[in-house]
Amino acid sequence: MDWGMQNRLSQLIKPDGHCMFLPIDHGYFQGPTTNLEKPAETIKPIIEYSDALFVTRGVLRSCVKPEGSKPIILRVSGGTSVVGKDLANEILTTSITEALRLNVTAVGLSIFVGSDYEKETLSNLANLVNVCEDYGVPVMAVTAVGKELEKRGSRYLGLCCRIAAELGAKVVKTYWCDDGFDKVVAGCPVPVVMAGGPKVGSDKEVFDFVYDGMQKGAIGINLGRNIWQNPHPVAMAKALYAIVHEKATADDANDIFIETKNQ
Ligand code: 5RP
């Protein structure tokens, strides 16, 4: 691997081999979603617990200070909305020139395997990798399901992750699942990070699935709503950081969460 690519990846994946990305890209199809109406305010108290921000160029320029910024994973796919016909019908929205101008550490896009736009979104990934390899910029593929959250089983996710890696993604972001997440990770030759999806019922559930996923080989998380839509985002971020980087168990994380939110 060339120096530039290695250098960028090392900014995202810490020396312990783990990473905690903070996604705030949801507005690109959800608009001003709950607790992300003002992204600068959302990230201010929790940014210290993140290794990188996943964000579009619009929010990056308008809400994130360039001085002393965390590494940036630039969301470069979009073109659809929650009220449109099909969330899967994405295009590449942002050029490599723009990504380099913004000095980003990586770029990320969604693929929608099994959708009507499977071929288009996989072409987006392949084309993006072709360009990004020329400049040493890692591509993170997001195995997206749109509104079909029930798709998130191990056979489907394993298929998506493997295809993403085969097409050249350097990191794959996917969902945790309870029916064989270890197989999803084992079948993917590049590092896997976990997304959270819509906010789940209890705080402990989040710690349980993140801990389980880390034990089963994920290198980290890219969790948004389950952190910043929680009434105690700082406690949530601190507790999850402890699982990812400090070898905390789910019970340890729960204790950290309770202690921090009561301070
Ligand atoms: C949305 C994304 C998010 O980055 C991803 O879904 C992670 O956030 P969350 O934990 O809220 O699901 O790709 O477009």
Image: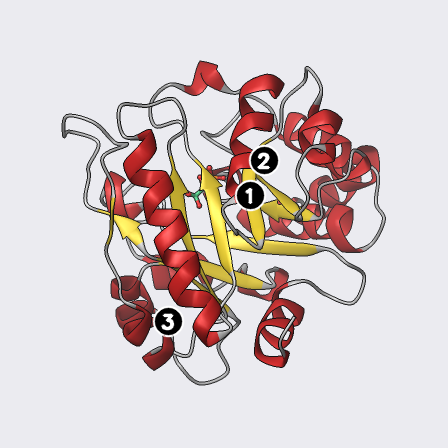
Image spot of residue 58 (x, y percent): 25, 64
Q: Residue at label 1?
A: 166
Q: Quadrant of ligand 1?
A: top left
* Circle 2: element type: helix
What is the distance, in whole Å, between disc 1 and disc 2 at their CAs?
A: 6 Å
- Using residue 207 as the reference point, say whether residue 231 is left or right of it: left
Q: Nearer the viewer, mark 2 or mark 3?
A: 2
Q: Which label's residue is closer to the chain start, 3 or 1? A: 3
Q: Give the residue type that dot 2 points to.
A: Arg
The percent coordinates of residue 240 (x first, y second) are 68, 46
Do labels 1 and 2 touch, CB within 8 Å? yes
Residue 239 left/right relative to 155? right
The amino acid beneath tag 1 is Glu
Q: Is any part of residue 251 visible from this angle? A: yes
Residue 72's x, y, as percent? 47, 67
The local crowd at label 1, few if under 14, some if 14 to 19, many if 20 or more residues have their Cα within 10 Å, is: some
* Quadrant including the N terminus: bottom right
Up the image or down, 193 lies above or below 180; here it is below
Image x and y of residue 96, in percent: 33, 70
From mark 3 to mark 1, how far is it between C-alphas?
A: 33 Å
Q: Residue at x 42, y 79 (%)?
A: 103
Q: Is residue 76 above or below residue 57?
A: above
Q: Which residue is mark 2?
A: 162
User: Is residue 223 shown to the viewer in this render?
Assistant: no
Q: Quick one: which residue is furthest to the left in this view?
A: 84
State the image quarter where residue 134 is shown: bottom left
Q: Which residue is mark 3?
A: 64
The mark found on residue 245 in the picture is: none
Residue placed at 70% from the left, 42% from the top?
A: 257
